[in-house]
Image: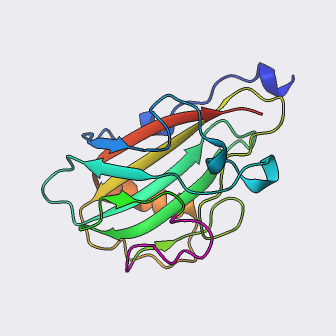
Amino acid sequence: MSSLDRGTPPDPFDLLPRVPSFTLSSGDFSDGGTLALSAVHTSAGGENLSPHLAWTGFPAGTRSFVVTCFDPDAPTGSGFWHWTLVDIPLSVTELPHGVASGDLLGLPSGSFHVRNDYGTADFGGAAPPEGDRPHRYIFAAHAVDVPSLGLPDSVSSAVVGFNLAFHTLARGVLRATYQR
């Protein structure tokens, strides 16, 4: 069976406990749109820059945020984590274009990355296999009920996701696609 014959994996948030939603937006792509070349990994000819994200309408009781980007269509059996930024302070409701790339000097104070599936602690852009179907990139801002998840930066994105299942009050989601 070729990679084009695979069934479509489920949206990962369909498998988790339901939570209310709030608004997540980007100046770099629209919900359901195609990722810009700036958000494509350098190995696939892009710039590997994190997209701009902003969020509003999160619930009272929110104490911090976590931002993630996940590709459920990666041919791995477990998807591919592109970005996990943890312990974003409540006062931060926007991440500028490129902040999670390069020197990381503009990251919110107190926040940190855990390794993505490229093995780096930053944003890792889209790089689906050439000729594969369009991949979905699911960006999420999670409103968290504690000021810190209390995790070290050495944990995996999956461990962060596990802890989010118990601390997410609401979630804003944007979905984009990219294909080579």
Toward which corner of the image does residue 176 lie, by quadrant? top right
Residue 108 part of the magenta segment: yes
Q: Where is residue 49 in the image (x, y as percent from the top left)?
A: 61, 57
Q: How many labels does the image show?
A: 0
Residue 50 part of the magenta segment: no
* Above-or-below relation of 124 to 147: above
Q: Can residue 23 be seen in this view?
A: yes
Protein image colouring: rainbow
* Above-or-below relation of 134 to 88: above
Q: Can residue 16 be seen in this view?
A: no
Q: Which residue lies furthest to the left in this view?
A: 60
Q: Main secondary structure of the magenta part?
A: loop
Q: Position of residue 151 (x, y in %)?
A: 44, 75
Of 15 and 24, nearer the camera is 24
Q: Is residue 3 left or right of residue 25?
A: right
Toward which corner of the image does residue 162 lie, by quadrant? bottom left
Q: Which residue is drawn at 79% across and 22% down?
A: 4
Q: In which quarter of the image is the C terminus?
A: top right
Q: Is residue 148 left or right of residue 102?
A: left
Q: In which quarter of the image is the N terminus?
A: top right
Q: Where is residue 138 in the image (x, y as percent from the top left)?
A: 51, 41
* Above-or-below relation of 8 to 119: above
Q: Where is residue 179 in the image (x, y as percent from the top left)?
A: 72, 32
Toward which corner of the image does residue 14 lie, by quadrant? top left
Q: Which residue is drawn at 32% across and 46% down?
A: 171
Magenta segment, which residues? 99-110
